[in-house]
Amino acid sequence: MEDQASELRAMFGKSNYNNTSTSTMQPPHKTRVIAVTSGKGGVGKSNISVNLAIAFAQTGKKVVLIDGDLGMANVNVLLGITPKANLLDVLNKKKKMSDIILNTELGIQIIAGANGFSTIANLTDEQRDFFAEEFTTLSSFDVIIIDTGAGVSENVLRFIESADEAYVVTTPEPTAITDAYGLIKIIATEFSDSKIVMKLIVNKVHSADEGKRIAERIITIVAQFLNAPVEYLGFIYDDSVVTSSVLRQKPFMVSQPSSKAAMCIKHIVGRIDKTTVKPSGGFSAFLRKIIGKK
């Protein structure tokens, strides 16, 4: 495990963040599908999804962020954007996927979630086929980040199953830790035959030791009772700029790029960039799983 605290100290010592500094570490092009998820709401999952997407884009990658919370979609709120169309319009054949992909000034593209949409599982066969065809539009992206809803609904699990990697976000709060374990347990048992890589992000910590301690506690319990591999991806400091960026609807990766929280995000993306994509079947598998076809 890399010493994130040491690397962050080194990063803070640099006067500027070079957006192309990690380009030499990029693996050959292959779409990386990441589901950012959590066992409960209020842990900062969507904010992390947005800022991870921006950080990836700052390394030169083509990134699309999908708001996968189909009941309470809020990525557009964090970005201060009012989308004219969303996933529901695609499902109802009112729009094509290319019509709802929204370009932003942040270097990322977003697909707005469908507020009020019940579940992907309710799609007809015709809708599934159309949905799959439209999703092929995303094959040109380097990174697809899915901001899932919180909890363990059928929609959440479908998005997680479709991904190569599931990043489980938690905080030091006991309820968040318990719910993170509960989510990991469901992923480990429901998708035991899949190759989904589970990784932990501990948000709102006051020290590097706190993040590491919480991650190790969860990983130890998971190994003991579930025999499932979970990696510690990193921590994010409890930083006041996070709250202010939400209120201003300006992601801190752009508004406060030298803040502690931003440095943590950059470190996490740097770690991800150093690993190769290990897709569970590739992009075609992503399509099959997201629409429920095995």
Image (spheres, helix red, strand yellow):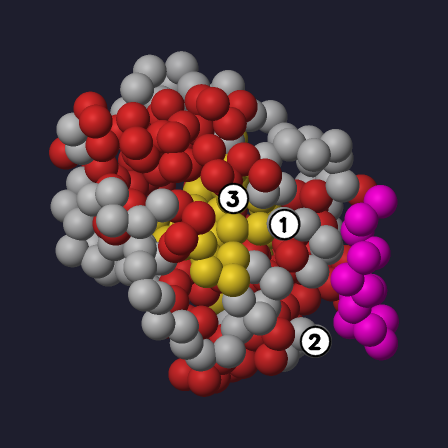
Residue tagged 2: 258
Relative to 208, residue 244 above or below = below
Q: Work out whether mark 3 precedes mark 1 in sequence or the reverse, and give the earlier one.
A: 1
Q: Main secondary structure of the magenta part?
A: loop
Quadrant of image for the N terminus: top right
Verify CB contact (< 8 Å) between mark 3 and mark 1.
Answer: no
Secondary structure at numbered mark 2:
loop
Q: Residue at x 50, y 40 (%)?
A: 138
Q: Nearer the viewer, mark 1 or mark 2?
A: 1
Quarter where residue 291 is shown: top left
Q: Point out which mark residue 250 bears.
A: none
Magenta segment, which residues? 10-24
Q: Is residue 102 visible?
A: yes
Residue tagged 3: 144
- Seen in the image, is 156 located left or right of residue 92? right
Secondary structure at numbered mark 3:
strand
Q: Position of residue 44 (x, y in %)?
A: 41, 63
Amino acid marked by disc 1: Lys
Quarter where residue 254 is shown: bottom right
Amino acid marked by disc 2: Ser
